[in-house]
Image: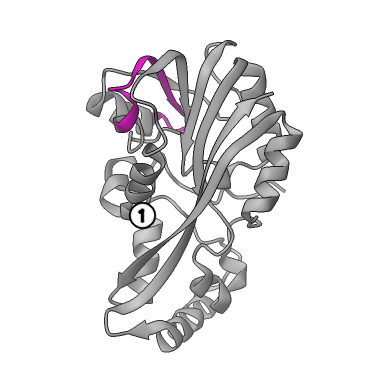
Amino acid sequence: MTKAPAHDFDRRASQYEDHAPVQREAAAWLAEWLPDNIEGPALELGAGTGLFTRHLVGRARTLIASDAAPRMVAAGFTALPEAKWSVADAATPPGGRGYGWIFSCSLVQWLPDPCEAFCAWHRASAPGARLVSGWFVRGTLGEFFATCPEASPFPWRDAAEWGRLLGQAGWQTARSEVRTFHRHHADSGAMLREIHNAGAVVPRRIGAGKLREALRRYDRDHRGESGVRSTFEFLRVEAVRS
């Protein structure tokens, strides 16, 4: 039986940025590690509508921004025509080989086989190429998954596990750091709607009754003066192709 996808980014492309405040903050934080001038051919994978691409177009002379969702790519091209946009899966980078820089933001946690993707990025890059990437790691939405473990769309890994996978694929980590972001919502239903409207999908195996009960526990256990809180743990990495 084919496993149902844990995301619906293509259908949500037109509203993604309205419901992705944490992804926007994370993109700005990751961009702190960008050089003023990005020399040589650069590739962004999982570019979406361009939240991180905005930080690249003024620095990179040659930038390909790619995403597997055609509507995301169309929205990105409309907003940022300075980049060359391409519909491509992250595991099969477009344009062949020889990239001096590879970027991604808020993508890697969704990869079904991240080590295979890291290897593909290694093959697509030039000797000495740099990878600048950031993604969500274990601890993200911990409040929600504590009340409903079955809602987690994939196995979560911590920073050390991700570092080992990068090393196995031929990437040497130069620096890495984890930052915690928080969001507050009126209630757990508003939290879940924001996540859903940004493209994430609650697995269908969870019945409506079970989900309602989990949200009631969330409201009971995590409500404060500012509403209910959700936590996001974001890892940023700079690595060199070895």
Could you tell me which secondary element the residue under label 1 belongs to? helix
- Residue 91 visible, this orientation: no
Residue 230 figure quarter = bottom left
Going 55% across and 79% down the picture, which residue do you hit?
147
Instruction: Decide if residue 75 is on the left or right side of residue 130.
Output: left
The answer to whether residue 242 is above or below residue 153 is above
Residue at left offset 34%, top offset 40%: 13
Q: Residues within 10 Å of mark 1 (few under 14, many from 20)?
A: some
Q: Residue at x 35, y 19 (%)?
A: 37
Residue 213's place in the image compared with 143, above or below, is below
- Does the magenta segment cover residue 59? yes
Q: Return the x and y of residue 168 as percentages of the image width and height.
A: 76, 35
Q: Which quarter of the figure is the C terminus placed in?
A: top right
Amino acid type indicated by mark 1: Val
Which of 134/88 is in front?
134
Q: Position of residue 98 (x, y in %)?
A: 57, 10
Residue range in magenta is: 55-70
Residue picked out by circle 1? 22
Which is more toward the observer, 106 or 161? 161
Residue 99, position in %: x, y? 53, 15
